[in-house]
Image (cartoon, helix red, strand yellow):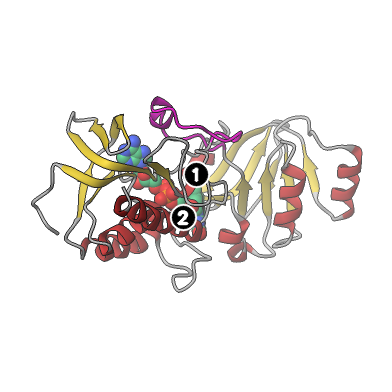
Amino acid sequence: MNQNRPDLHDVIIIGGSYSGLSAALALGRARRSVLIVDANEPCNARVPHSHNLLTHDGEAPQELRAQAIADVSKYPTVYFHKGRVTEVSGSDGAFAVRTAEGIAHTGRKLLLAMGVRDELPAITGLAECWGISAAACPFCHGYEVRDQRIALIGNTPDTFEYVNLVHNWSQQLSVLTNGPAMFTEEQRSNLSGNGIGIVEHTISEVLHDKGQVKSLRLSDGSQLAADALFLRSRTPLPSALPASIGIELTEQGLIKVDFMQHTNVPGVFASGDCASPMRALSMAIASGNIAGAVIVHELIHA
Ligand SMILES: Cc1cc2nc3c(=O)[nH]c(=O)nc-3n(C[C@H](O)[C@H](O)[C@H](O)COP(=O)(O)OP(=O)(O)OC[C@H]3O[C@@H](n4cnc5c(N)ncnc54)[C@H](O)[C@@H]3O)c2cc1C
């Protein structure tokens, strides 16, 4: 890594996880100066093994991340700053970011690769299980618990579709609505026809051993044994930085981008989970790489 940092970087990337690093790889290989500012809090930090990423299926996220940093660090125009960006200002050609410690950096373009924050229902024990025996995506974590006892927590308009999806991996499936269920009569009869129990009692606690769920204690005092939990967390952006520079959001509250990862603000791009509901390493890596390449084109033609 080169220590002679330029005053004005070609690009500043906020978030140096899978998506930000993938963008930096394209930019570094294009000999562009890139500063990656990263607070080092990737959403999958507690997950023992990641799945569904070709050539790395089953690898620990820490290993993936270490390899990604090693790949990017080979290029002398890539710089790292460990920290959290708390302020963004400027416009295309001259953006400024400031970190929590008050350090300022400037760049011609800005890439937001800041991920999302997982907000879980306030159920005792659930947060400890998140990433270990509780997850959202059955494509990532369904195979490992195939045919086991799965408890799915959810009670939103999309829960019916989600239950049917997870049922693909195990028929030992119960849906816990943590209160009166929103299902229609038709949905209820479809679920019971598939042998899927609906539990409407409030969940008092998730009982677990070091994050491995054992059972759920319910408000009537009973316990439901489970080997795995599935639930869709709420996923707000991790900060108001995008809003502070006028970035338009989608109905879901994610950053709105076109197929080249442009936001509505000239010179500002976004990639990975903060700009897509398709949360997966492959998607974060792909969109970051696209953003990197598009930024190079725009720098050349500026
Ligand atoms: C429990 C769980 C299990 C998962 N398992 C799998 C799996 O098995 N397979 C799979 O394909 N996908 C899996 N995923 C999804 C995958 O982890 C994400 O899609 C991927 O991490 C998204 O990458 P990203 O770079 O967009 O965001 P993240 O990896 O979340 O990284 C965002 C980075 O930005 C940083 N950041 C945020 N704000 C700032 C700021 N203001 N300043 C500086 N830095 C900032 C954060 O600290 C973090 O380092 C899982 C997700 C979860 C939550």
- Badge 2 residue CB within 8 Å of ligand 1: yes
User: Callout 1, which amino acid?
Assistant: Ala
**Residue under label 2:** 287
- Magenta residues, as a range? 234-253
Looking at the image, which is closer to me, 233 or 279? 279
How many labels were placed on the picture?
A: 2
Examine the image and state in which quarter residue 170 appears: bottom right
Q: Which mark is residue 275?
A: 1
Q: Residue 53, percent across and down?
A: 49, 66
* Magenta stretch: dominant secondary structure: loop
- Above-or-below relation of 157 to 5: above
- Badge 1 residue CB within 8 Å of ligand 1: no
Q: Which residue is rendered at x = 87% and y = 43% of the image?
A: 188
Q: Residue 124, percent across and down?
A: 54, 34
Examine the image and state in which quarter residue 296 appears: bottom left
Q: Secondary structure at mark 1?
A: helix
